[in-house]
């Protein structure tokens, strides 16, 4: 029997070690596009920062993507909700993120990552731009790139978040944002195995919103290869409050403002909570025909209920248990109405767009920067790009050996969600609402209901391969036993 045991062990090792990867998503004109299928990718996302910004403590050994067991729980809940993207704000690039990244990859969820943090010297200081833009700061943001560049589900990096929060900051900050974008893109080009987009997340300050977009998304001197131009533009928008109309929320103005965009534009945060519980009726507008010609989806703020606010979809407890809030159910109801096939339809004209040449004529607000002279890279910065940072902590996909969530999770009605588990998807699929995965070769269907039933099985190439392997092993065992 030792030979038989070796066969069984080898088979188990093979099935466990297979790590399917989502397809890379690229920026093509004004759209995100699947690099293999050429389907359009619309962001259906949620902000993911357990503990909030106050919960990020340097040297604690913990960040939102460092605990695989907690990520398993949250990935299962996000998968049944229909999420395909998470935004993560505060990361420690020295930690191991392999299991969390692999779990989200397995369920078809991409990651948009902020390279900055609220800690000292880990972000640009609008009040002291010259001093805060230094090689130590660049080492920090390059370290985040190193930590996540090898995960296939890394969708992009935010080079800044709400750095401009009033008209006054528009005078001096924009050139530095372009400098950081340039440095990140040059580092990625030199040190990453693939191109990863870099963008900016803006506050909804209407006085400077259009100018911020125009300044950051144009090509200096008409150079289409300008590395200081952002690849995507995110807007943190909270103007749709309650059950209002498209015009009441000012969405018509946003559509007009970005109607000529040449890069993907999306809500990097949205979900006003002035009316509770949130109904999320804006979901139908955002993913409806009035907006999808311009916008590439959005990221709900936020997954975890924080003590300091009331934006959470889920309550998390210190013992690892969790409870869904009514907001989770309401959002799932809205997501389940979406026409995913229509959202994935490509637009040849949108993907062929080219960025405009930078000019002061693009800027309307008096006092906003009109000079496109970008600061030179700080002393030592180019060496970091050319040689890579010292001792980088490179992430990699690892086998996901557990699907079932080990802790209790409760529905918004207080009932226990039974058999909660992730449902790994075949290689060419990303997660979609209602559990229907139409971006790949099959229709995967984890449960999309609020009752928390066991995810349905997935048929397709990945499972067919395992079935074939099972057949081969069974044949070998049968032959061995009868010889």
Image (tube, grey):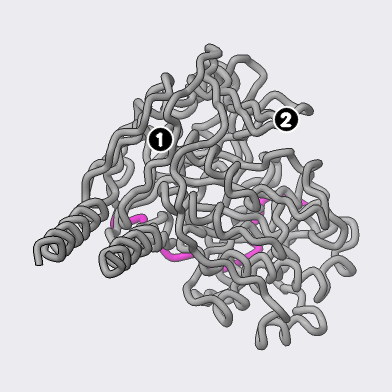
Query: Which residue is depicted at the point 66% across and 47% down?
Result: 64
Task: Pick the residue in front: 407 or 375.
Answer: 407
Query: Marks 2 and 1: in contact by CB < 8 Å?
Result: no
Task: Name the spot of residue 410 as percent of width and height, x first.
Answer: 54, 21
Query: Which residue is depicted at the point 41% across and 59% down?
Result: 25
What numbered label is drawn on residue 432?
none
In magenta segment, residue 33: no
Image quarter in which the C terminus is found: bottom left
* Vertical position of residue 3 compared to residue 113: above or below: below
The magenta segment = 348-367
Image quarter in which the N terminus is found: bottom left
Question: Upstream in the sequence, badge 1 or badge 2?
Answer: 1
Secondary element at image label 2: loop
Q: Nearer the viewer, mark 1 or mark 2?
A: 2
Q: How many marks?
A: 2
Residue annotated with mark 2: 306
Residue annotated with mark 1: 287
Task: Name the spot of residue 211 as percent of width and height, x first.
Answer: 65, 52
* Vertical position of residue 282 compared to residue 95: above or below: above
């Amino acid at each position: 029997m030792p030979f038989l045991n070796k066969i069984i062990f080898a088979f188990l090792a093979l099935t466990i070690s297979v790590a399917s990867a989502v397809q890379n998503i690229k920026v093509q004109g004004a759209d995100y596009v699947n690099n293999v299928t050429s389907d359009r990718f619309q962001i259906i996302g949620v902000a993911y920062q357990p503990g909030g910004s106050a919960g990020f403590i340097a040297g604690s050994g913990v960040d939102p993507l460092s605990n695989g067991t907690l990520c398993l729980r949250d990935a299962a809940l996000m998968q049944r909700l229909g999420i395909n993207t998470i935004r993560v704000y505060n990361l420690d690039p020295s930690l191991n993120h392999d299991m969390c990244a692999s779990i989200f990859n397995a369920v078809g969820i991409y990651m948009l990552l902020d390279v900055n943090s609220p800690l000292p010297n880990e972000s640009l200081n609008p009040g002291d731009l010259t001093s805060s833009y230094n090689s130590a700061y660049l080492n920090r943001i390059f370290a985040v790139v190193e930590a996540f560049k090898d995960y296939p589900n890394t969708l992009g990096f935010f080079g800044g978040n709400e750095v401009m929060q009033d008209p006054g900051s528009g005078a001096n900050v924009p050139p530095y944002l372009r400098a950081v974008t340039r440095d990140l893109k040059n580092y990625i080009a030199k040190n990453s195995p693939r191109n990863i987009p870099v963008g900016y997340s803006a506050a909804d300050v209407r006085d400077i919103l259009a100018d911020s977009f125009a300044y950051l998304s144009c090509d200096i001197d008409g150079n289409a290869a300008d590395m200081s131009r952002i690849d995507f533009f995110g807007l943190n928008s909270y103007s749709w409050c309650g059950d209002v109309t498209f015009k009441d929320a000012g969405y018509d103005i946003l559509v007009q403002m970005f109607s000529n965009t040449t890069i993907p534009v999306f809500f990097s945060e949205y979900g006003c909570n002035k009316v509770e519980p949130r109904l999320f009726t804006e979901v139908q507008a955002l993913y409806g025909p009035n907006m999808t010609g311009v916008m590439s989806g959005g990221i709900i703020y936020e997954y975890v209920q924080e003590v300091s606010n009331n934006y959470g979809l889920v309550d998390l407890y210190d013992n690892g248990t969790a409870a869904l809030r009514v907001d989770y159910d309401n959002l799932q109801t809205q997501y389940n109405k979406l026409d995913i096939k229509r959202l994935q339809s490509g637009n040849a004209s949108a993907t062929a767009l080219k960025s405009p040449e930078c000019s002061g004529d693009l800027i309307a607000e008096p006092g906003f920067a009109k000079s496109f002279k970008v600061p030179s890279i700080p002393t030592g910065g180019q060496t970091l790009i050319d040689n890579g940072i010292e001792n980088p902590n490179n992430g990699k996909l690892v086998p996901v050996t557990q699907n079932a969530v080990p802790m209790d999770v409760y529905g918004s009605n207080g009932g226990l969600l039974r058999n909660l588990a992730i449902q790994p998807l075949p290689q060419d699929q990303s997660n979609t609402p209602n559990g229907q995965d139409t971006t790949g070769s099959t229709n995967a269907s984890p449960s999309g209901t609020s009752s928390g039933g066991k995810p349905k099985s997935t048929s397709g190439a990945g499972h067919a391969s395992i079935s074939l392997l099972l057949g081969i092993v069974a044949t070998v065992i049968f032959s061995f036993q009868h010889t």
